[in-house]
Image (spheres, grey):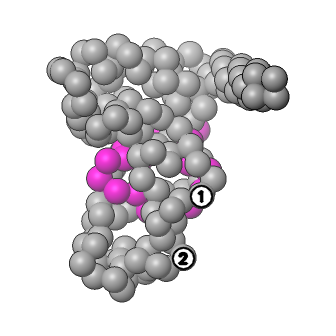
């Protein structure tokens, strides 16, 4: 993967400095990689004085640590990430983010079983960069990514309907 993408993780500003928090920059943590908003917000000063890194809407976000290891999503917001998230940006227009996100999601169990020994372990940026991804041409990637995205959305809608019907009984 490292041959066709750039990746980086962020950091967490010191919680001892209240001037770093309460600003208008969303601070995306691993449980929020698929969220439309965040609980915490950073100030510009918090970004400048830490290793937190900015991501853009559409970047692939990959959870590296703890209970969310291997979770993946496409950022829905511009914001900053901490060290538990790997941002993945494709180098050229030869690859589709939705396809790669779906591929990572499909490979989650295999990646976890191969690289994390025991319960809640950690992945690393180097592990992700060394993953070997078979990629069809860009047109096929777009079709595959869109298909599985629509399938996931349909499953989610039907799960909500089922859940609501159970609650209304």
Taking the magenta stretch, the answer to whether it contains residue 90 is yes
- Circle 1 residue: 37
Horizontal and vertical percent position of residue 95: 55, 31
Horizontal and vertical percent position of residue 49: 28, 78
Spot the residue most to the bottom.
19
**In the image, what residue occupies the spot 56% across and 43% down?**
34
Spot the residue most to the front.
169
Q: Nearer the viewer, residue 90 or 24?
A: 24
Q: Is residue 117 left or right of residue 159?
A: left
- In the picture, residue 117 is in which quadrant? top left
- The quadrant of the picture occupied by the N terminus is top left
Horizontal and vertical percent position of residue 140: 66, 18
Horizontal and vertical percent position of residue 166: 76, 22
**In the image, what residue occupies the spot 42% across and 53% down?**
29
**In the image, what residue occupies the spot 49% across and 17% down?**
106
Q: Is residue 101 above or below residue 79?
A: above
Residue range (magenta): 74-95
Q: Secondary structure at mark 2?
A: strand
Residue 97's disc is: none
Q: Nearer the viewer, residue 131 or 148?
A: 148
Q: Secondary structure at mark 1?
A: loop
Q: Nearer the viewer, residue 46 or 93?
A: 46
**In the image, what residue occupies the spot 63% across and 53% down?**
36
- Circle 2 residue: 24
Pointers 2 and 1 in contact (C-beta within 8 Å): no
Q: Is residue 131 left or right of residue 107?
A: left
The alpha-carbon separation of the residues under discs 2 and 1 comes to: 12 Å
Q: Is residue 36 above or below residue 130?
A: below
Q: Is residue 154 visible?
A: no
Q: Is residue 83 left or right of residue 77?
A: left
């Amino acid at each position: 993967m490292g041959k066709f993408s750039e990746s980086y993780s962020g950091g967490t500003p010191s919680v001892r400095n209240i001037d770093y928090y309460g600003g208008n920059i969303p601070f995306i943590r691993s449980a929020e990689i698929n969220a439309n908003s965040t609980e915490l917000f950073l100030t510009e000063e918090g970004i400048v004085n830490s290793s937190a890194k900015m991501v853009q809407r559409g970047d692939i976000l990959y959870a590296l640590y703890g209970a969310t290891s291997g979770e993946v999503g496409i950022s829905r917001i511009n914001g900053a990430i901490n060290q538990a998230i790997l941002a993945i940006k494709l180098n050229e227009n030869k690859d589709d983010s939705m396809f790669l996100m779906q591929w990572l999601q499909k490979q989650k169990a295999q990646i976890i079983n191969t690289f994390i020994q025991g319960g809640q372990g950690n992945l690393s940026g180097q592990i992700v960069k060394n993953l070997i991804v078979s990629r069809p041409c860009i047109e096929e990637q777009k079709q595959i990514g869109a298909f599985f995205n629509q399938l996931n959305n349909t499953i989610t809608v039907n799960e909500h309907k089922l859940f609501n019907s159970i609650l209304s009984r």
